[in-house]
Image (cartoon, rainbow, N blue to C red):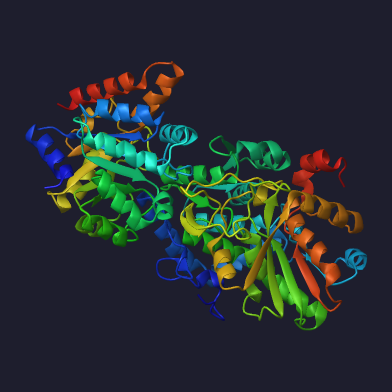
């Protein structure tokens, strides 16, 4: 069983939703982002790690700030892989999902990128701007290396399309809660989100399906029926705030993740 | 890679939306899949619908003022003493540039789609100004995304947009120019695609936006073909069509009717923005053989670093200050149908000086890049050679820059 599946199974056994975090590699430095990962991994089930891009077309302000900060600090792809490698070797290691935009992968070379992902211990990949069915070939290549390619489904996805996507999905499906970039304010009711979420879930109950976008300390409880919940912008925002206040982002971000975890137990 | 004859270039893509098998496509977030599909279906219906075409032609004529004139630049031709230079005065179109064609068509489509809001990006401010004009005309609420740097340097167009009742959203991320405005506009659409129509300001973006824009600006070459025939009685044996290229919407519009001609008869020359002399930052991906990459939902040649991060660009002309270029121009380059070169800021300014000194026209800094090339090559060419420059924008918007750089303006 894959580490991603195991993480969901573990959460299920504990009768709770799985907590997925998203932070940007290199924010606010290579060293600090690794420290943050190691620290929040004590409370998170799966860690999504963003590889920054400077023209992100689906990220809100918080994640954009994190990405620009990381790039400004000179983060390179090789640094991102070394962060993942160090994290996966640590005793706090959790499954890692790399997330980003296709051009970064494309310039690196699809095969080369997947191979090195495998080597450093990446468990899953989310490529925001490589939708279904364009991603079929890439997803196949990932599967060959036992890396989960994670498909996204949004409120605009039609039922027939949803069926195809779920059928071709791997260990995890990411349901986007609403029409928004990352970090938007939850603009529809959790009840509605869960109703749509269940539509996806009911197509194949075995697939681990998580909800992301707009999830914060305030909203997390209302969605805890999902298999997993992703919190990203709230963490990026905390890093920005910590830097502004000259506080340690590691402590502050960890505290949020700890509180999030307590809310879903 | 080969061009097909008798098929509009905008339709020469495969099922996945790629021209030449690798340019274009749809690299978009899942949320946009459905709206892009809906728009694709709607456009497919509308473009063959007689009523819609009649409506389009009505507004092209009565709102935009088509056809724009075709004039000989006799003084410039005499001064340079070689090829005969003509200009297609697209800057006469309502609003002062070719962007009005795309803006008008997008508003017509938005109405048909039942959308009440329309959003768009802008660099030089022309795409935004035109969209705000058309939105006002058709009763749509309009929001324009514009880089903070461009807001400062293209003030006259900013005032015009505000006057038309559009909300201008300044974009502070990245280089604060067109590239960031397009990103921010797409992000806004991701969040509001249920009630909002998006207009991409050039022949860039996901496949359908390239098509709609190209379909709209193609009006320029339909007019030009008629005008050439009436001026010369037939299509002359030697023509060069010179056009500036940022995203590439005016160049496609200027060339579309002539792509099927042999390039020895009608040569297509695209002039990109080389930026300040000796500057390493340029906005000329085709000229400088930039690598294929993905930007704003499409695969095309794009100025970027080895890590896939998009480069900052620098050009005096905000309308050309874009690191990417239309997939259809990549296709025209690789099939060798068109040739792409660049002109520097200084070349464009010198061209502005000479053209406005000799002729009663006032081209903006974007077409001045094309004039720069015409001025450079005309003296070396034979008198039978016809050079036609698309004077696709008016310099009113550039008055601050021209004042700062040249001291006085026309």
Which image quarter: residue A93? top left
Residue B128: image location, x then y, percent: 62, 47
Residue furthest out toward the left:
A13
B301 or A35: which is nearer to us? Answer: A35
B194 or A120: which is nearer to us? Answer: A120
Vertical order, B404 against B299 (above or below):
above
- Circle count: 0
Q: Quick check: B207 left or right of B179?
A: left
Vertical order, A77 against B23 (above or below):
above
B306 or B106: which is nearer to us? Answer: B306
Q: Residue at coordinates 39% horizontally, 56% vertically from top-left?
A: A109
Q: Residue at coordinates 14% horizontally, 44% vertically from top-left?
A: A5
Vertical order, A10 against B319 (above or below):
above
Residue A181: image location, x then y, percent: 40, 40
Q: Quick check: B172 left or right of A124?
A: right
Residue B218: image location, x then y, percent: 63, 67
A252 or B116: which is nearer to us? Answer: A252
Q: Residue at coordinates 80% horizontally, 67% vertically from top-left?
A: B377
Q: Is residue A79 visible?
A: yes
Q: Is residue B126 visible?
A: no
Vertical order, B266 against B104 (above or below):
below
Residue B324: image location, x then y, percent: 56, 54
């Amino acid at each position: 069983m894959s580490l991603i599946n195991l993480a969901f199974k573990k959460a299920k056994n504990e009768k709770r939703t799985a907590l997925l975090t998203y932070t940007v590699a290199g924010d606010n430095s290579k060293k600090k982002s690794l420290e943050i990962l190691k620290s929040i991994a004590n409370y998170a089930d799966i860690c999504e790690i963003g590889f920054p891009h400077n023209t992100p077309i689906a990220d809100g302000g918080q994640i954009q700030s994190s990405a620009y900060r990381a790039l400004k600090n000179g983060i390179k792809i090789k640094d991102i892989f070394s962060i993942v490698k160090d994290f996966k070797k640590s005793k706090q290691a959790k499954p890692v999902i790399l997330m980003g935009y296709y051009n970064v992968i494309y310039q690196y070379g699809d095969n080369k990128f997947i191979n090195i992902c495998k080597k450093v211990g990446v468990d899953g990949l989310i490529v925001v701007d490589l939708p279904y069915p364009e991603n079929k070939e890439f997803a196949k290549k990932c599967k060959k290396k036992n890396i989960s390619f994670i498909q996204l489904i949004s409120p605009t996805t039609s039922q027939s399309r949803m069926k195809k996507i779920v059928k071709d999905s791997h260990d995890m499906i990411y349901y986007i809660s609403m029409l928004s970039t990352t970090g938007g304010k939850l603009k529809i009711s959790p009840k509605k989100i869960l109703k749509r979420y269940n539509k996806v879930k009911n197509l194949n109950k075995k697939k681990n399906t998580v909800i992301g976008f707009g999830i914060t300390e305030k909203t997390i409880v209302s969605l805890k029926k999902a298999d997993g919940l992703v919190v990203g912008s709230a963490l990026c925002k905390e890093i920005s705030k910590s830097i502004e206040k000259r506080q340690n982002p590691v402590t502050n971000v960890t505290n949020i993740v700890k509180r999030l975890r307590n809310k879903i137990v | 890679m080969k061009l097909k004859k008798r098929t509009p270039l905008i339709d020469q893509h495969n099922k996945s939306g790629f021209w030449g098998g690798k340019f274009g496509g749809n690299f978009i977030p899942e949320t946009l899949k459905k709206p892009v599909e809906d728009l694709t279906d709607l456009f497919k219906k509308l473009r063959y619908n007689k009523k819609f075409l009649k409506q389009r032609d009505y507004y092209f004529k009565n709102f935009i003022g088509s056809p724009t004139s075709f004039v000989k630049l006799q003084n410039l031709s005499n001064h340079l003493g070689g090829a005969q230079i003509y200009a297609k005065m697209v800057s006469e179109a309502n609003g002062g540039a070719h962007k009005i064609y795309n803006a008008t068509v997008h508003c017509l489509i938005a109405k048909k789609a039942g959308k009440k809001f329309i959003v768009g990006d802008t660099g030089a401010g022309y795409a935004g100004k035109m969209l705000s004009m058309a939105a006002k005309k058709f009763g749509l609420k309009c929001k324009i995304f514009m880089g903070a740097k461009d807001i400062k340097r293209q003030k006259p167009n900013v005032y015009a947009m505000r006057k038309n009742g559009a909300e201008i959203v300044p974009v502070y991320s990245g280089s604060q120019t067109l590239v960031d405005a397009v990103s921010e506009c797409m992000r806004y659409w991701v969040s509001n695609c249920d009630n909002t129509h998006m207009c991409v300001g050039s022949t860039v973006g996901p496949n359908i936006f390239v098509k709609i824009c190209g379909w709209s600006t193609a009006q320029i070459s339909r007019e030009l073909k008629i005008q050439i025939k009436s001026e010369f009685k037939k299509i002359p044996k030697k023509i060069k069509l010179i056009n500036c290229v940022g995203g590439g919407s005016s160049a496609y519009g200027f060339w579309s009717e002539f792509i099927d001609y042999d390039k020895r008869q009608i040569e297509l020359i695209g002039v990109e923005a080389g930026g300040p002399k000796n500057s390493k930052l340029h906005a000329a991906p085709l000229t400088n053989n930039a690598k294929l990459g993905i930007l704003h939902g499409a695969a095309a040649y794009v100025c970027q670093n080895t890590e896939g991060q998009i480069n900052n660009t620098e050009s005096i002309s905000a309308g050309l200050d874009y690191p990417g270029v239309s997939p259809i121009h990549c296709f025209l380059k690789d099939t060798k149908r068109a040739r792409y070169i660049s002109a520097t800021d200084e070349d464009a300014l010198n061209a502005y000086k000479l053209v406005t000194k000799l002729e009663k026209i006032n081209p903006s800094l974007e077409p001045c890049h094309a004039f720069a090339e015409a001025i450079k090559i005309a003296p070396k060419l034979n008198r039978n050679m016809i050079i036609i420059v698309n004077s696709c924008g008016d310099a009113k918007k550039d008055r601050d820059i021209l004042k700062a750089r040249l001291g006085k303006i026309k």
